[in-house]
Structure formats: structure tokens, C-alpha cells
Amino acid sequence: MTLSISVDEALDPGLTSFLKTARSVVVLTGAGVSAESGVPTFRDAQQGFWARHDPMQLATPDGFARDPGLVWDWYQWRRKLIAETSPNAGHRAIAELAGQLPGLVVITQNVDGFHQLAGSRHVLELHGNIQRSICSRTRRDIPASWLDAHPDRSPVPSPHHPQGLARPDVVWFGESLDEKLLGAAFAAAQACDLVIVAGTSGVVHPAASIPAVAVEHGARMIEVNPVQTELSRLADWRLVGPSATWLPRLVESLSK
Ligand code: BV8
């Protein structure tokens, strides 16, 4: 049975008392937690020039093979957007929750690095990090200094392979996730007694199956999202509204 709470209602006392006794918490985040920082989510319309392109086509090996310059420019545009903004109150609240709840693990689908910037220390970046670049052939790291030495090239040649190109160190659709990271995420989900799912539509796998794994192993679930999602049916509590409003309230409830 899911209890939905809107932003103009108080937190359910059952939720706050459970939160206080939680011994092992997992927070799964998606693009929605960065929305209030001004970083567009994956399913919102892209802005400007990119409105003509489908992110689902660009964030793929085929998209990069077809037009590496276009995909490289899209990531450069996203990197610039992310560099011009910063983590929001939702990211900071998750970092504060970790300070008060033992062993809290952040599992994020986001590639903006905002959880670490906001102070979270135990972050599993399932889909990589847009700030890092690797060689498209060898997957070896490419330092920012190499990119800075080729400011007007798109795509940028790789220093590690004659046919290699620089690409973002993210997991594209159709690419497998890092086994160790995914294993750690599922292990944390199986061991937790509370999973907080914030800002995700729950459509991208295998990340989307993490809440079900937690709930199947006995965890309670809080969902933070302005709208209903594929995961809402798993939630004990649905906090209906933005994460930058609800997550600080969860932190506040711990000190009451
Ligand atoms: C793989 C990096 C093996 C790139 C990303 C099983 C079933 C179905 C499909 C599959 C499956 N297994 C595999 C697949 C295929 C595919 C997939 O899931 N497709 C889906 C779309 C149908 N998965 C894969 O390819 C994965 N690889 O499984 O490898 C394999 C190999 C070959 C063939 C098959 C399998 C790799 C997936 C990783 C893709 N890379 N990112 C980049 O960023 O450029 S995923 C990308 O989507 C982002 O990381 C994003 O975070 C993520 C998920 O989306 P969300 O985070 O949920 O964002 P979204 O926009 O959807 O939703 C935002 C939510 O926030 C909304 O609900 C909104 O209401 C809410 N919101 C808005 N504002 C706020 C808010 N919430 C709170 N506060 C607010 N203010």
C-alpha cells in the first residue's frame, strides 16, 4: 500500500520514525535530481540546436560511429552546461543524510558528478562521468590537457591509437555497465532496509531494477518524484514533488 504525500502536507510519522531507525540506506538517483540545477533530464526536450536530436540516438556507439563530431559536440555542450551550474539542495541533502544515516550508499544514473561535488563520499556512478574522456579504441584515459591542446578539433583524435577518438567516459545505450560497480549496487540494494528513489523515470535498465531488488529483500521504499513512474507501485511512501524540496525535509525530520 503506497501513501502519497504532497508538498503542502506534513511527512507521515511512520516514515520519519522508520527513517530514524534505518540501519542501511541506499539512495538511487536519476536525472530529476539535477533538474533543479538546470541540467535537462533525459526525457525533457533538448534545448536549442539539440532540439532536433534524440539523446537516445546520440548516446549510443552507433550514433558516435555515424557522426563522432556531432556526438562529441553534444557532450561538449552538456559539459559546458554542467560547468556553468552547480549541485542543488537535493544533492546537498543526500550528502547530509549520509552524515546521519550509517552506511548510506548513493547509486546514481547521472553523469554530472554533482553528488561528489555536494559532498557525498560513497557514490556508485553506474553510467560513468561526463567530465572524463577515454580513447574510443583502447578505453584508456585521455587527460583534459590533451583535449585543451586540440580546442578546435571535433572529434578529437586519441593519443592512444591511430584510429582512436576521444569519447566521454559514460555508458552508452547498448553498452554494458561496469560489472564491479553493478555488483556493488545490487549488493547494497539486497542489504539495505530503506531505498530512497529520487528523480528517475525507472525506464533505463539495469539501474531501474535496483529498487525492486531492495524491496524483494525486505527494504521499505520512498519515491521522490513530481509524477508517477514505473517504480511508484513499489513505494511505501511517495513524496510527490521536487527533490530539492523533499530531500531537505527528510534531513530536517531527523533532527525533530
Ligand atoms: C545494458 C549515460 C547490457 C549516457 C545513460 C531491459 C529492459 C529494457 C531495456 C533494456 C533492458 N536491459 C538493457 C536494455 C537496453 C537499455 C535500456 O534500458 N533501454 C531503455 C531506455 C528501454 N539499457 C542499456 O543499454 C544499458 N546497457 O543493459 O548493457 C546490454 C548490452 C547490449 C544490449 C542490451 C543490453 C545501458 C544504459 C545506460 C545508458 N546511459 N547515461 C549519457 O548520459 O549521455 S542513461 C540516461 O538515462 C541517463 O543516465 C539518465 O539518468 C538515465 C535514466 O533516465 P532518468 O535518470 O530516469 O531520467 P529521465 O529523464 O528518464 O527521468 C527523469 C525523472 O525525474 C522523471 O521521472 C521526472 O518526473 C523526474 N523529475 C523531473 N524533475 C524532478 C524530478 N524528480 C525529482 N525532482 C525534480 N525536480
Image: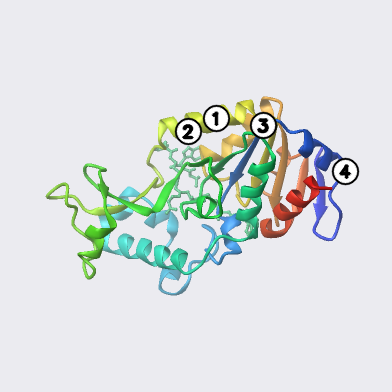
- Rounded to the nearest angstrom, the CA distance separating label 1 from label 4 is 29 Å
The answer to the question of whether label 1 and label 4 lie on touching residues, with beta carbons closer than 8 A, is no
Report which quarter residue 35 is drawn in.
Answer: bottom right
- Residue linked to disc 2: 182
Give the number of the disc on residue 13: 4
Q: Which residue type carries mark 2?
A: Leu
- Residue 4: % across, % down: 81, 48
Q: Which residue type carries mark 3?
A: Ser
Q: Which residue type carries mark 4?
A: Pro
Depth check, front residue: 79 or 230: 79
Q: Residues within 10 Å of mark 4 (few under 14, many from 20)?
A: few
Depth check, front residue: 5 or 142: 142
- Rounded to the nearest angstrom, the CA distance separating label 3 from label 4 is 20 Å
- Rounded to the nearest angstrom, the CA distance separating label 4 from label 2 is 34 Å
| CB at disc 3 and ligand 1 closer than 8 Å | no
- Residue linked to disc 3: 24
Give the number of the disc on residue 161: none
| CB at disc 4 and ligand 1 closer than 8 Å | no
- Rounded to the nearest angstrom, the CA distance separating label 2 from label 1 is 6 Å
**At 67% from the left edge and 59% from the top edge, which residue is drawn?**
244
Give the number of the disc on residue 186: 1
The answer to the question of whether label 2 and label 1 lie on touching residues, with beta carbons closer than 8 A, is yes
- Residue 159: % across, % down: 17, 52
**At 35% from the left edge and 64% from the top edge, which residue is drawn?**
76
